[in-house]
């Protein structure tokens, strides 16, 4: 896989670390910006002050590998408070088939590209609930005529690679709750 800096990344680079795994679309105007803000706050307000930032890896998979890559991933991270040069957060992309294998096959996360016109036509407003719109300047600048609809999932993976907790409403999980779970998995330094 390739990270936001264009560097090749292997899963072995996360060995021995607690991982917070998310699935993000750089042009998203709903859940992804909220998740990104929570992750940036977790690092800045939680992991660094607790002295455990080096024991944790934030790993996001780009679920729009056909149309976005490292440039858009860096811009997305910046606008929600993260310096892309800080590789405590790895935003990853690969060829579409590989992304599908990892995201859907490995984490059971569903995603699909839909045209904005089709999405608006199917949005009746009845039982689907209201999805808040979040400012995403990158999306505005891209003039993308599509959306990637997907599960709103955040998985916490322990140091041995086992999924320990799954949040199905990742956009609503604040950094203090994430910090509590991470701290319960991180062994104190000797």
Image (tube, grey):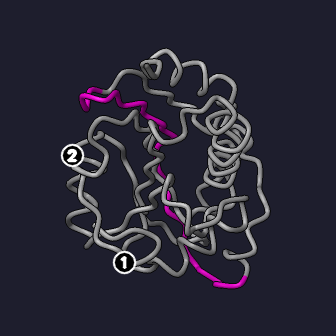
Would you identify the image quadrant in which residue 52 lies?
A: top right
Q: Which residue is found at the position 70% from the left and 44% from the top?
A: 44
- In this rendering, the count of numbered labels is 2
What quarter of the picture does the N terminus occupy? bottom left
Q: Residues within 10 Å of mark 2 (few under 14, many from 20)?
A: few
Q: Up-down: is 151 above or below 73?
A: above
Would you identify the image quadrant in which residue 48 lies?
A: top right
Magenta-colored span:
141-162
| Numbered disc 1: secondary structure | loop
Residue situated furthest top in the rendering: 184
Disc 2 from disc 1: Cα separation: 18 Å
| Residue picked out by circle 2 | 105
| Residue picked out by circle 1 | 66
Would you identify the image quadrant in which residue 65 lies?
A: bottom left
Viewer-proximal residue, 175 or 88? 88
Q: Residues within 10 Å of mark 1 (few under 14, many from 20)?
A: few
């Amino acid at each position: 896989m390739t990270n936001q800096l264009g560097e090749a990344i292997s899963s072995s680079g996360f060995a021995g670390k607690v991982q917070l795994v998310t699935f993000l679309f750089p042009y998203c105007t709903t859940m992804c910006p909220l998740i990104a803000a929570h992750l940036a706050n977790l690092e800045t307000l939680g992991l660094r002050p607790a002295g455990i930032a080096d024991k944790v890896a934030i790993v996001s998979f780009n679920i729009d590998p056909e149309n976005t890559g490292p440039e858009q991933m860096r811009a997305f991270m910046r606008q929600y408070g993260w310096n892309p040069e800080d590789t405590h957060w790895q935003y990853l992309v690969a060829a579409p088939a590989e992304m599908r294998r990892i995201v859907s096959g490995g984490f059971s996360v569903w995603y699909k590209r839909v045209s904005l016109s089709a999405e608006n036509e199917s949005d009746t407003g009845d039982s689907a609930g209201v999805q808040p719109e979040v400012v995403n300047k990158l999306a505005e600048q891209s003039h993308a005529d599509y959306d990637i609809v997907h599960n709103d999932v955040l998985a916490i993976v322990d140091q041995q690679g086992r999924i320990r907790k799954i949040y199905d409403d990742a956009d609503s999980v604040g950094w203090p709750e994430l910090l509590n779970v991470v701290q319960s998995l991180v062994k104190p330094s000797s």
